Image (tube, helix red, strand yellow):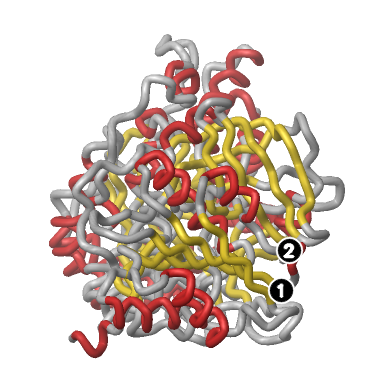
Amino acid sequence: MSSTGTAGLEGLVRVRPPETGLRPEPTWDEAEVVAHEVIGGRYHRLVLHSPSIAARADAGQFVMITVPSAPGERVLLPRPMAIHRRRVATGDLEVIFNIVGRGTDVLARAVEGDALLLTGPLGRGFEVPDGDGPVLLIGRGIGVCAVMGVAEDAQAQGVPVLAALSGRTRDTVIGEADCDELGAEPVIVTDEDGSSAIEALETILRTRLDGTPPRVVMVCGSGRLTRLAVALGREWNVPVQVSLEAHMACGVGYCHGCAAPIAARDDVEGPLVCVDGPVFDAGDFDEVA
Amino acid sequence: MSLATRLSPPALDDSRGAFFDARPPASGDVDLSVTIGSLTLANPVMPASGCFGPELGRLIPVDEIGATVTKTVFAGSRGGNPAHRLTEIPAGMVNSVGIPSKGPRGYLSDLHPAYAELGVPVIISVGGHRPDEYAPIVAELDAAGAAFEINVSCPNLDRNGVDIGADPDAITQVVESVRAVTDKPLIVKLPPMVSSIVDCARAAESAGADALCVSNSVPALPLDSVTLRPALGNVIGGLTGPSMRPIILRLVWLTSTSVQVPVIACGGIETANDALEYFSVGARAVQVGTASFSRPYAMVDIVRELTQRCRAAGATTVAQLVG
């Protein structure tokens, strides 16, 4: 669903405090492919018609997409994907993925009019805290997809958003058009011009924020960016939330395939990315403890 | 932790509505029931241990399947194996979740209430590292379980994949000890990779098993095709999914012709037709595992289609259908 695994984040990630509100009830749906677009020759954006899931999804939640049978190709397990956009008015939702294996290779063959089985919305999404200052979103690659729903909510609530969108090249950066549509301020950084380097991005963010700390930092798509977010959150004394990915089979909590290796003891299972996340708190929790 | 998840009520536009409402009429023309010891199930379809949780009750009408089967409960608390815990291969998946468990007390307090609410018999899967670990767990859970599945065959617990279920004498010891502490039906889940599954099956039956489950997953070592390193954190896992079917069909055929007790087939069942294949070689019930991941409603579909297939053929039972 994103490209931030838990490797290297031990001690920086923990389950968030219990929710105060209700989480949307998951459902499943045969969703029609409304559009399929290739972005930057690399990413595939699918628009899927699923009014029941689009209407109830929270920002940062995900869906499990069952991969249809293709000639000579049988993919058994559904693939978790972040809900990039929710378009309640048309009953659509959007996902974006990169071809990384057999499952995404088959999904990339989807054409308009195909039906895909979706289960969702799943997991615990982002929660924007009350406070002053903008929301700072940091996403790299398809990790941008996990955080973009926050910009949708922030627009509705009149909360300003600064969105750092990182990618290898200018034409593969995801989210610029979404930011324009949602009134969020994009910060495009790339590997090809060096601006995505951690020190460079930090400098750009400080300049853009101009001394006004954000109320929260939300990050997805890179362990290095997560560590930067944690460092900035500590300096600014603001919460940091990170969306993680894991291999999973069911998406709803019973297969236990996605336990994050952040349990304090060997005889206790780590939190499940699918139901205890995918959004976790990020910080220097070892030092706090 | 997952069972405490806060959820909002289903929305009125819930797309599952038609599926939930579509249950077949409860007329008595087709009888799918199956008897395991003193327990009669309304139909022969149940989940494979580890491939079900009360969470699935939010997505499907669980009361349409014959029973639920819990994840295996061990004596102590287990955290499970390191990531990655599962990977996919062509026509199968390999998992090495490592059976995280909260022990019998944790099961009763944290998990059983949600199972009990589902409205179908709860078969509690019990595991152990040594033969003497099983009976105390069953004794502690005796009141909660409608039946017990004795898991002597999880391949993920020892790195070399050798387990109690490969030794008929150890099976006898486990089943006799459990039989002594409960009157509830006992299902013994056997491993597939043994020198003689018939010897294992007969040992279980002689020691008091009311049914056999054939079988657990096949020990496997999947590699990452790019790095050529193990794809699983535990290196070795258990292969499941449709690639298992011809392997397990053979084992079900061998066991069902060697014992009197019912054999429950478990191996790559995705559709009612897959179930009928197993019934035709002697199985009396089926467990569905991997298929539920991609199609949450797979078990309910199988129950409904078995009913329809019987009706269409003018049969009142599955036995008549498969001849």
> Which residue occupies the extreme front position in the image?
A210
Residue A252 coordinates in the image, percent (x, y): 42, 50
Residue B41, relative to residue A270: is it above or below?
above
Residue A269, relative to residue A65: is it above or below?
below
Q: Quadrant of residue B203?
A: bottom left
Q: Please name the amino acid that badge 2 sits on.
A: Thr
The chain ID associated with circle 1 is: A
Cα distance in 3D space between marks 2 and 1: 7 Å
Which quarter of the image is occupied by the C terminus of chain A? Answer: bottom left
Residue B169 in view (yes/no): no
Residue B152 coordinates in the image, percent (x, y): 40, 69
Which residue is at the front of the view, B170 or B11?
B11
**Residue labelled with disc 2:** A172
Residue A276 coordinates in the image, percent (x, y): 33, 60
- Residue A130 is left or right of residue A7, and the answer is left
Q: Estimate how packed mark 2 is, as few (under 14), some (14 to 19) or many (20 or more) residues with alpha carbons within 10 Å.
A: some
Q: Please name the amino acid that badge 1 sits on.
A: Arg
Residue A194, relative to residue B74: is it above or below?
below
Question: Which label belongs to residue A168?
Answer: 1
Tell me how many marks there are. Answer: 2
